[in-house]
Amino acid sequence: MKTLCPVGKATVRKEVLDAMGYSYQYFSGIYRSPSSGKLAYFVCYDYAFSPINEKGIDKALIVQKQDYFDKYLLNPWAKY
């Protein structure tokens, strides 16, 4: 994802990630934005992606992980 997101935020077609062999089932947590509520970001180390669909085209909104993600990160290993 780092290659596709050199400036902190990028939108790419899902087929690009597929061609690169990205495995969607591996992620370290889920971040749900408290302000948008609709977007869920799947966090993988220092980057996160949110699946989106624009005009019938599946895409991934890729962002660099931010410190504030930790406050709202759904971590399967966290002690709640």
Image (spheres, rainbow, N blue to C red):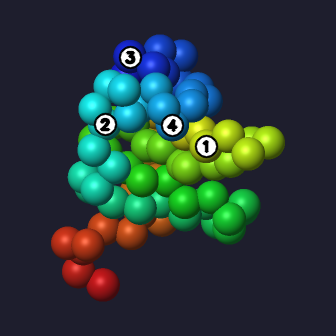
Q: Earlier in the sequence, mark 1 or mark 3?
A: 3
Residue at mark 3: 3
**Looking at the rendering, in which quadrant would you find the N terminus?**
top left
Q: CA distance from mark 3 to mark 2?
A: 12 Å
* Furthest residue in direction bottom, as rendered: 80
The residue wearing badge 4 is: 14
Q: Residue at x 48, y 21 (%)?
A: 5
Please state the total of marks drawn on the protein image.
4
Whether residue 14 is visible, yes or no, is yes
User: Is label 1 in a helix, a strand or a loop?
Assistant: strand
Three-letter amino acid code of the residue under disc 2: Tyr
Q: Residues within 10 Å of mark 2 (few under 14, many from 20)?
A: few
Cα–Cα span, label 1 and label 3: 19 Å
Pointer 4 local density, CA inside 10 Å: few below 14, some 14–19, many at least 20: some
Residue farthest to the left, as pictured: 77
> In the visual, does 80 lie left or right of 36?
left
Q: Position of residue 73 (x, y in %)?
A: 41, 63
Q: Is residue 78 above or below residue 60?
A: below
- Residue at image point 39% right, 69% down: 74
Residue 22 bears which disc, if any?
2
Q: Which mark is residue 58?
A: 1
Residue 21 percent coordinates (x, y): 28, 32
Which marked residue is nearer to the observer: mark 3 or mark 4?
4
